[in-house]
Image (spheres, rainbow, N blue to C red):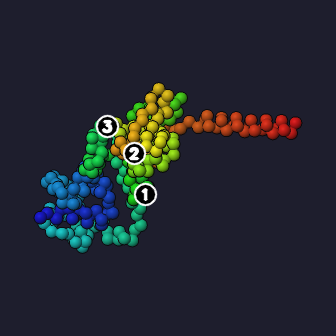
Amino acid sequence: MSFFGKNIKKIRSIKSLSQQAFAELFDLKRGTLGAYEEGRSEPKIETIIKIANYFSIKIDDLLTSELTVNQLLKFKGDLTTNVDEIKRERFPYIPCITEVTLQDYISNYNKETFINELPTIQLPLNPDKKFRAYTISNLEMTSHDKGFYPKDIVVGEYVPNDIIKKLNNGTLVFALVNDQLLFRRLYVTNNKMAVLRADHKSIADEEFEIQSIKELWRVRYVFCRRIPDFTDIMEDKLLMIEQELLKMKKKLG
């Protein structure tokens, strides 16, 4: 029995490294590292050598016995045991669906092993809730040069099917239904039908039974690749103020 998984997990704990951070040190995927730690998979010899050399640990010790904290301290001077004394905020890693992974996601959305292999983003969100990020690849949610553009990213919170009908009409969502992932505004009719409407006027509405939706994510955060244009917003406010002043002038006159 190899102790490799237990030992690298202990090293991570002492070094205050997340699975993602540790994996990136050695060109691994987070899901692969998780499989090592849980004993579901064994590493290649090159990976073992890299980790042993990095932390100045003998390969034999890394594989054949459970390392103690004292042993690890002797192996590398910058390892520390005061992890509990340091307050660290752990941000969850959010799987991100990209243009490259989209088709594979549609086929494997319910397979944890696949989800663990997706690229991730890390945000200060509630770790007890389930989130998914989606990279926009079209102009279906634009209107008059405003809205969402390719490479923008939206982050959605998972909504169970029995809660979908309680969402407000016009809520931004992305939904997996009929082998397609749609980013739209949601409108619910008759408590059982979901209408997914694009902001672009040339895109027709899509209508589905709520129970046929495989996944639905309510958009909570948006990341744009460009600085939004607030010019029109300011002009609208100035126009409104001007109109109010004219009304007051007429009343006083």
State the quadrant of the C terminus: top right
In this figure, which residue is indicated by the disc labeled 1? 126
The quarter in which the N terminus is drawn is bottom left
Residue flagged by tag 2: what amino acid is it?
A: Leu
Q: Amino acid at mark 3?
A: Asp
Contact? badges 2 and 1 (CB < 8 Å): no
Label located before the other in sequence (3 or 1): 1
Q: Position of residue 17 (x, y in %)?
A: 32, 60
* Residue drawn at (28%, 62%) of the image: 12
Which residue ends up furthest to the right in the rendered image? 253
Other-residue count near label 2 (Cα within 10 Å), few / some / many at <14 / 14–19 / ≥20: many
Q: Which residue is mark 2?
A: 216
Q: Secondary structure at mark 1?
A: loop
Q: CA distance from mark 3 to mark 2?
A: 13 Å
Percent position (x, y) of residue 215? 36, 45
Q: 104 or 186, which lies in front?
A: 186
Q: Identify the residue at horizontal 46%, vertical 47% (top origin).
A: 165
Horizontal and vertical percent position of residue 34: 25, 56
- The residue sitting at the bottom extreme is 70
Q: Which residue is mark 3?
A: 179
Q: Nearer the viewer, residue 185 or 75?
A: 185
Q: Compare residues 152 and 240 and report the one nearer the observer.
A: 240
Quadrant of the image occupied by residue 48: bottom left
CA gap, disc 3 to disc 1? 29 Å
In this rendering, which labeled residue sits more in front, label 2 or label 1?
Answer: 2
**Number of the label disc, if any, that sits on residue 63:** none
Looking at the image, which residue is at 45% across and 37% down? 195
For label 2, the SS is: strand
Left or right placement of residue 239 versus residue 20 in this view: right
SS under mark 3: loop
Asked whether the viewer can see residue 216, the reply is: yes
Evaluate if marks 3 and 2 touch, with contact meaning CB atoms under 8 Å apart: no
